[in-house]
């Protein structure tokens, strides 16, 4: 039970403090437990205010565990075979299953999945393994992925029973499509002429001002944010296993960005809180070290974004009620982690902080109903009341003001998108390929005149084409070929340059002059070529034109992701706090029981 685990942690900490080694005499002798163990148990029973029988049980468990670890370490040094322990929580709040296995660490993640699948009677294709907060990859060795002897593995099954194999297959397909849709959204954001119904994803600071970052980093952030939103939606629906996998995918993408960027916005802090929340709902106590590190990171980022005492938040937004919901969850999770680490004093302190915030953020039901009757959504009403500390009139005014700010922001986004599209179309109308125009506009910060200057200074950009099929469809007349050849270029190079320039004579000549008269063949002229191109418009990254079926499938994948992108940008701050209240009460009860002899 949680109470027994908590006592065991407290006993272990007392042993460390006193330098007691249970695997040595007088606590262990040739016959097993030594006589001194009972005397030690009596002392700790009095010190920890716990029943003697429970303390003795904890001491014996810890003694046997220490002996087993010593044996496993000796075996690993001698044979290279490590003992790994795993814990699996059945979906839907089912029972916890634990076990251990012996293995070499040079096997792949796929081989470990197959072994655990056999032990748990679950096909390996239906399992995901997590170690130290990272999903174990199938194709790499355990050693390469940081798995060590005595590692604790969290096993996430994607099915309940064999009868649900079909549903499980659909679940895995949904996860794969979510990743595909998120990637497509990131790519479309990279392409300056996105469909009108695509969400306008943007990295902004606490004032809502866009943050200018390198394109590759921006792409990783967009992918991470899309995966995070989908994972958050799954958390809300209680799909904790699937949510955790997407959240850890988002974590991997976030970590491709500079640490100073991640600390400038609260997105990564919120992700850390969501990952630890998923651990809690999956009863994954083995993930406590990773949970602790994530909460430290989350608090540091929130303090930097909002100020240690939320002073930056007050100066930026005039209130802190909405954002304090993040701190409520932070304090609650910190208290839970401290509880499981055996530090009752810190657990009580943080849970008390959470309780104070919970009381402060509680929304009066009548006031909420009144605002809803005025035409506001329950989410708007909750956020408004928290922002205005329960003042009904101020909350109504606040919600109206926030609606106007959102309307203005969306209008600004539409105008920015219109300008982006118009600039791209202007360059395309001049005969430039989409990829050439998009790259020049990126470098010119969307200034058409500056983009033209860049194209003049860097004619190598003219060699970029939308896709090879478009090049092949360009009509190159004999007259154009003769004009280029008259300048001293051979037939093949003249044809390549004209196709690349989409029939524009001057651009073709400029390209040939810059390249010294030699151009590489396009990917379409060589079936063995594997060079990647950026997906645009009707093209694919492999250079071929998408079929109508592929385009439809990609639209559907994006729509599945965007369906969970909330319209309200402060959705992540909204919660009824019902779950938090229930979990807080559970752990306060456990702490009270631990203090009762």
Image (spheres, rainbow, N blue to C red):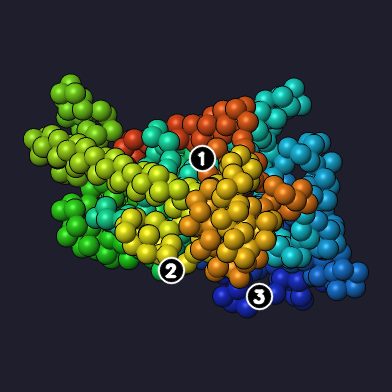
Q: Nearer the viewer, mark 2 or mark 3?
A: 2
Residue 18 in sight from this viewpoint:
yes
Quickly name the residue at label 3. 20
Task: Give the labeled residue for mark 2.
Answer: 457
508 relative position to 569: left or right: right
Mark 3, residues whose alpha carbon is within 10 Å: few (<14), some, or many (≥20)?
Answer: few
Q: Quadrant of the N terminus?
A: top right
Frontmost of labels 1 and 3 is 1
Q: Of the residues under marks 2 and 3, which one precedes in the sequence?
A: 3
Q: Earlier in the sequence, mark 1 or mark 3?
A: 3
**Label 1 Cα crowd, 10 Å radius (few <14 / some 14-19 / many 20+):** some
Residue at mark 1 to residue at mark 2: CA–CA distance: 26 Å
Query: Residue 479 appears at what percent x and percent y?
Result: 57, 48
The answer to whether 82 is drawn above or below residue 561 in the figure is below
Residue beneath disc 1: 537
Q: Residue at x 32, y 66 (%)?
A: 304
Q: Residues within 10 Å of mark 2 (few under 14, many from 20)?
A: few
- Indicate whether 437 appears above or below 178: below
Picture coordinates of residue 504, whole percent (x, y)? 50, 51
Q: Earlier in the sequence, mark 1 or mark 2?
A: 2
Q: Can you see residue 252? A: no
């Amino acid at each position: 039970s949680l109470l027994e685990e908590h006592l065991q942690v407290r006993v272990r900490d007392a042993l460390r403090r006193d330098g007691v080694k249970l695997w040595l005499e007088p606590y262990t002798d040739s016959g097993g437990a030594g006589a001194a163990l009972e005397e030690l148990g009596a002392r700790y029973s009095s010190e920890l205010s716990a029943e003697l029988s429970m303390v003795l049980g904890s001491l014996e468990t810890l003694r046997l565990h220490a002996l087993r670890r010593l044996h496993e370490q000796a075996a690993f040094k001698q044979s290279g075979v490590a003992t790994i322990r795993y814990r699996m929580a059945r979906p839907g709040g089912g029972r916890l299953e634990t076990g251990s296995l012996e293995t070499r660490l040079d096997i792949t993640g796929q081989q470990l999945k197959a072994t655990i699948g056999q032990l748990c009677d679950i096909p390996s294709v239906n399992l995901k393994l997590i170690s130290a907060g990272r999903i174990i990859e199938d194709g790499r060795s355990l050693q390469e992925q940081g798995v060590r002897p005595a590692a604790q593995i969290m096993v996430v099954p994607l099915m309940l029973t064999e009868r649900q194999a079909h549903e499980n297959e659909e679940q895995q397909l949904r996860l794969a499509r979510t990743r595909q849709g998120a990637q497509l959204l990131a790519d479309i954001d990279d392409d300056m002429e996105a469909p009108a119904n695509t969400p306008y994803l943007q990295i902004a600071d606490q004032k809502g001002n866009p943050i200018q970052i390198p394109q590759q980093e921006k792409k990783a952030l967009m992918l991470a944010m899309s995966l995070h939103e989908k994972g958050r939606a799954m958390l809300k629906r209680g799909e904790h296993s699937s949510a955790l996998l997407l959240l850890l995918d988002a974590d991997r993408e976030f970590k491709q960005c500079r640490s100073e960027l991640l600390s400038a916005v609260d997105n990564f802090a919120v992700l850390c809180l969501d990952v630890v929340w998923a651990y809690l709902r999956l009863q994954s106590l083995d993930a406590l070290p990773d949970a602790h590190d994530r909460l430290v990171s989350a608090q540091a980022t929130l303090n930097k974004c909002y100020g240690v005492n939320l002073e930056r938040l007050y100066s930026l937004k005039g209130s802190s009620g909405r954002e304090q919901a993040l701190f409520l969850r932070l304090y609650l999770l910190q208290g839970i982690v401290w509880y499981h680490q055996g530090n009752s004093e810190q657990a009580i302190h943080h849970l008390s902080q959470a309780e104070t915030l919970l009381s402060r953020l509680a929304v009066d039901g009548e006031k909420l109903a009144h605002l809803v009757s005025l035409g506001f959504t329950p989410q708007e009403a909750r956020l408004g009341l928290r922002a205005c500390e329960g003042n009904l009139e101020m909350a109504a005014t606040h919600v109206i003001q926030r609606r106007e700010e959102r309307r203005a922001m969306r209008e600004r986004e539409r105008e920015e998108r219109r300008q982006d599209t118009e600039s791209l179309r202007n360059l395309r109308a001049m005969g430039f390929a989409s990829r050439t125009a998009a790259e020049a506009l990126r470098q010119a910060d969307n200034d058409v005149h500056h983009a033209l200057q860049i194209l003049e200074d860097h004619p190598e950009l003219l060699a970029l084409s939308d896709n090879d099929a478009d090049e092949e469809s360009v009509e190159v007349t004999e007259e154009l070929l003769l004009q280029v050849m008259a300048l001293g270029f051979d037939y093949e190079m003249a044809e390549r340059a004209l196709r690349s320039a989409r029939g524009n004579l001057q651009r073709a000549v400029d390209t040939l002059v810059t390249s010294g008269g030699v151009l590489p063949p396009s990917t379409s002229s060589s079936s063995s070529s594997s060079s990647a191109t950026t997906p645009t418009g009707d093209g694919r990254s492999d250079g071929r034109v998408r079929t109508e079926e592929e385009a439809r499938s990609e639209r559907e994948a994006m729509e599945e992701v965007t369906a969970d992108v909330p319209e309200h940008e402060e959705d992540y701050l909204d919660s009824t706090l019902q779950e938090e209240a229930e979990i807080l009460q559970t752990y306060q009860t456990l702490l009270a029981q631990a203090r009762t002899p």
